[in-house]
Image: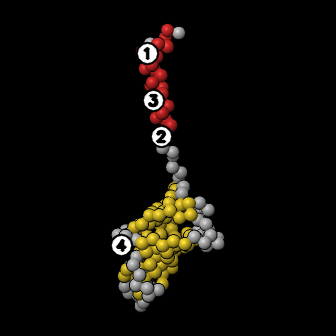
Amino acid sequence: MSWFNTIEFYVITGTIAAGALAVVSLPRRRSHSVLHTVPGRLYYSGDNADPALDMWVDDNRRIHIIRRGLPDVSDMGAASLAINHSGFDLIVEERLTFDRRGESPVDTAEFIIDFVGPERYHIRYNSEDTSLMTAFTIPVKEGIKMTRELK
């Protein structure tokens, strides 16, 4: 019993306690990520709106994203989203193809995200071509509507 009162005992138990605390404090492992590509449907709305995202969740729990304020895109151009899906995090990269040879201008794109479940998702939306971004959380429940400005 006298061994419990020695310095060696306290050093060993302190080291074990610090090791256990370090193991418990480790961050959780992230789940694997999946890359999805979502094509966009381009059209002209005539709003002359500032760059923004209008979103809503339909009855089938699909997220509809309307990207307003597209610059210099014509009907010959294209828009798509590259979405990195990891757990409840979605990192969205907007991809625009500029083509001024088209006959009519385009200022709006619509995307439908149909691979998410009924949870809260953290979304980071980045448009490298226009140097705009936004971040938000959206609960995937029927009838949810929200608007986020791109800055």
Q: SS class of the residue under badge 1?
A: helix
Answer above or below: position of 73 versus 132.
below
| Image quadrant assignment for residue 72 | bottom left
- Look at label 3 and name its amino acid: Ala
Q: Residue at x 54, y 57 (%)?
A: 88
| Lower sequence index among marks 3 and 1 | 1
Question: Residue at 47% of width from left, 13% of height from top?
Answer: 5
Q: Name the residue under label 4.
A: 130
Residue 24: x and y, percent?
A: 50, 37
Instruction: Tell me the amino acid under the disc marked 1.
Output: Glu
Q: Which mark is residue 26?
A: 2
Q: Name the residue under label 1.
A: 8
Identity of the amino acid at label 4? Thr
Seen at 45% across and 24% down, the residue is 14
Disc 3: which residue = 18
Estimate the spatial distance between the alpha carbons at disc 3 and disc 2, rounded to whole Å: 13 Å
Amino acid marked by disc 2: Leu
In this rendering, the label closer to the viewer, 3 or 4: 3
Q: Quadrant of the C terminus?
A: bottom left
Residue 88 visible within the image: yes
- Indicate the secondary structure of the residue bearing disc 4: loop
Work out how far the residue at label 1 is from the one at label 2, CA to CA, in angstroms: 27 Å
Mark 3 to mark 4 CA distance (whole Å)? 48 Å
> SS class of the residue under badge 2?
loop
Question: Position of 66 compared to 69: left or right?
Answer: right
Pick whichever of labels 3 and 4 is earlier in the sequence: 3
Q: How crowded is mark 1: few (under 14 residues within 10 Å), some or many (20 or more)?
A: few
> Where does the image place residue 50, in percent across and percent down from the top left?
39, 78
Tags 2 and 4 touching, CB below 8 Å: no
> Can residue 34 be seen here?
no
Front-most of residues 87 and 104: 87
Label 2, residues with CA under 10 Å away: few <14, some 14-19, many ≥20: few
